[in-house]
């Protein structure tokens, strides 16, 4: 299925939120987000493993494809570094082409991959090698959009290198550039946006620089999408810890009941897209 307005416009920031299963994707949709981010961090954490190339491409694809089947809004899949070279990327994109996933995002971090938000040193893949992955993805796709995620700011390589890589990935055919940062302020992503001189849209992931507003993104002029990548998972962890601890402390679940969704809300999430709950 095509989603022609995936990247919004000058006056509209498309907003996605992360999920790791169909229930989460439906909560994202019901909250009014424009789409779902099939987050590798959420998917890995839900399985109790690090977000560090532990899951196979098939596991990541299965989770994203299930979410795309379960909601009517677009799902953008986190494709990590592509799980190998150009041939592996072609295989991955072909698999997403056979699902309802609207787009796949590939990042230019080195392998073995580390989650961008982890402390310590982060390395980049050689620019030419990653550009070939983007070319492979674009060459294989028929409808799926291809997002190229620039990790240069995460790796501490500076604006010039980030821009150089962004330009190269546009030349390779990327439909959008995701400029990532783990700074606690939005300054460096906004500086990148101000220097961006291509019509290709930019995507932000405001996890650490959470004070950025939608108005600031619109004012940047080149930002078209914001991905709130892991907020649902983090909210669920915090809420579950509170409820479970209250039940243990009280020796009963009566008081905790006020913190819980109703069973009717649970049943509503079991309904197929456009259908009624059982």
Image: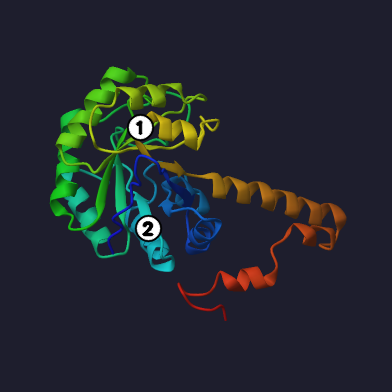
Element under disc 2: loop
From the viewer's side, name the closer residue of 227 and 33. 33
Please report the residue visible at 15 percent of the width from the left and 35 percent of the height from the top.
Answer: 171
Kindly identify which numbered label has been placed on residue 221.
Answer: 1
Using the rendered view, name the quadrant where residue 148 is placed: top left
Q: Give the position of the C terminus as an image quadrant.
A: bottom right
The total of numbered circles placed on residues is: 2
Q: Earlier in the sequence, mark 1 or mark 2?
A: 2
Kindly check if marks 1 and 2 are in contact, taking CB atoms under 8 A apart as contact.
no
Please report the residue visible at 30 percent of the width from the left and 22 percent of the height from the top.
Answer: 195
Using the rendered view, name the quadrant where residue 70 is placed: bottom left
Q: Is residue 190 above or below residue 244?
A: above
- 163 on left or right of 29: left
Kindly identify which numbered label has been placed on residue 202.
Answer: none
Kindly identify which numbered label has been placed on residue 74.
Answer: 2
- 266 on left or right of 7: right
């Amino acid at each position: 299925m095509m989603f022609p307005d995936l990247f919004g416009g000058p006056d509209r920031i498309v907003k996605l939120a992360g999920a790791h299963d169909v229930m989460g994707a439906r909560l994202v949709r019901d909250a009014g987000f424009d789409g779902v981010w099939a987050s590798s961090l959420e998917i890995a954490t839900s399985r109790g493993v690090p977000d560090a190339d532990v899951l196979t491409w098939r596991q990541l694809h299965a989770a994203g494809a299930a979410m795309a089947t379960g909601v009517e809004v677009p799902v953008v899949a986190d494709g990590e570094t592509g799980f190998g070279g150009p041939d592996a990327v072609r295989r991955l994109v072909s698999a997403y082409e056979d699902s309802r996933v609207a787009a796949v995002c590939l990042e230019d971090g080195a392998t073995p991959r580390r989650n961008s938000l982890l402390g310590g040193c982060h390395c980049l893949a050689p620019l030419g090698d990653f550009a070939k992955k983007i070319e492979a993805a674009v060459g294989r796709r028929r409808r799926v959009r291809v997002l190229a995620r620039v990790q240069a700011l995460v790796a501490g390589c500076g604006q010039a290198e980030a821009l150089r890589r962004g330009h190269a990935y546009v030349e390779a055919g990327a439909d959008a550039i995701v400029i990532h940062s783990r700074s606690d302020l939005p300054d460096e992503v906004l500086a990148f946006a101000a220097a961006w001189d291509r019509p290709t849209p930019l995507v932000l992931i405001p996890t650490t620089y959470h004070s950025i507003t939608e108005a600031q993104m619109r004012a940047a002029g080149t930002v078209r999408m914001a991905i709130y990548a892991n907020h649902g998972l983090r909210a669920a962890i915090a809420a579950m810890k509170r409820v479970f601890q209250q039940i243990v402390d009280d020796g009963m679940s009566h008081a905790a009941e006020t913190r819980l969704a109703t069973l009717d809300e649970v049943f509503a999430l079991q309904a197929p897209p456009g259908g009624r709950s059982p």
